[in-house]
Image: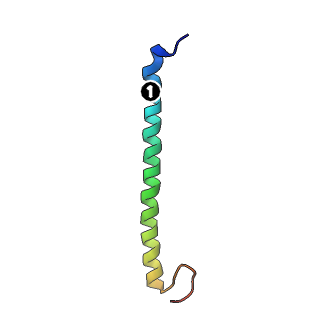
Amino acid sequence: MSAIPHIGSIVAAYAVTAVVLGGTVAAVLLDRRSLRRTLERLEARAGRGRAGTPR
């Protein structure tokens, strides 16, 4: 029982997994950047810093 005949499907499975995980990480990082910008705009509008104290 050698895995050589199935090496194509094994490599394809790893490649698909890598693409999906990479896409998930990229989506999380982009969402984090967007949320951070939104939070900064809201904090600026409220006139407060991160600690919740007036500037």
Image height of 10 relative to 28, above or below: above
Give percent across and percent down for residue 5: 45, 13
* Element marked by disc 1: helix
Residue extending furthest toward the top: 1
- Tally the marks: 1
Measuring from the top left, give residue 22's x and y in whole percent: 44, 45
Q: What residue sits 47% from the left and 73% below the top?
A: 39
Q: Give the residue type that dot 1 points to.
A: Val
Residue 49, horizontal then vertical, whole percent:
51, 82
Asked which quadrant contains residue 33, the reply is bottom left
Q: How is the protein colored in the picture?
A: rainbow
Query: What residue do we see at 45% from left, 57% from top?
Result: 29
Residue drawn at (57%, 86%) of the image: 53
Q: Is residue 40 above or below residue 3?
A: below
Q: Disc 1 marks which residue?
A: 11
x, y percent for residue 48: 51, 84
- Graded by Cα atoms within 10 Å as few (under 14), some (14 to 19) or many (20 or more), the crowding at tag 1 reads few
Seen at 46% across and 66% down, the residue is 35
Q: From the image, which quarter does the N terminus lie in?
A: top right
